[in-house]
Amino acid sequence: MCLDCCTCPEGVVMFLDRRVVVSTKCGEIRGILRAFGETFLEVEEDNPKLDLTVIQCGQICSIRLLG
């Protein structure tokens, strides 16, 4: 693990394969949380097409479920 990386919280397991909103310093990413590692999340976005976005945990402000 690198020294300047931020680790993702273990609590994101309950968000796997569910619709989420990930808030970052640059805005929001909406989609389905498909995977996560020690330092990143992978979200399958549904706008405008299906794209897989990798987000570094150090950039994440919050994660919440879409209802």
Image (tube, helix red, strand yellow):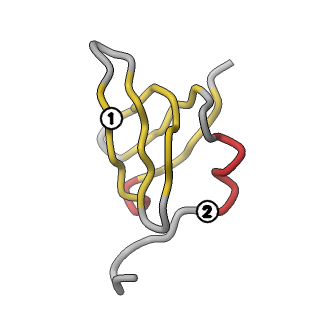
Residue 28 on image: x %, y %: 40, 32
Helix, strand or loop status at disc 1? strand
Disc 1 residue type?
A: Leu
Is residue 39 positioned above or below 65 on the image?
below
Q: Residues within 10 Å of mark 1 (few under 14, many from 20)?
A: some
Q: Residues within 10 Å of mark 2 (few under 14, many from 20)?
A: few
Of mark 2 and mark 1, the one earlier in the sequence is 2
In the image as oriented, which residue stretches furthest toward the bottom?
3
- 14 sits left or right of 63 in the view: right
- The quarter of the rendered structure image containing the C terminus is top right
Q: Residue at x 62, y 23 (%)?
A: 66
Query: Label for residue 9?
Result: 2
Q: Residue at x 40, y 63 (%)?
A: 58
Q: Residue at x 53, y 63 (%)?
A: 8
In front: label 2 or label 1 = 1
Query: Label for residue 52?
Result: 1
- 8 sits left or right of 41 in the view: right
Give the CA separation, mark 2 to mark 1: 20 Å
Helix, strand or loop status at disc 2? loop
Residue 1 on image: x %, y %: 40, 82
Q: Residue at x 40, y 31 (%)?
A: 29
Is residue 27 positioned above or below 1 on the image?
above
Residue 17 on image: x %, y %: 60, 33
* Labels 2 & 1 near each other (Cβ < 8 A): no
Disc 2 residue type?
A: Pro
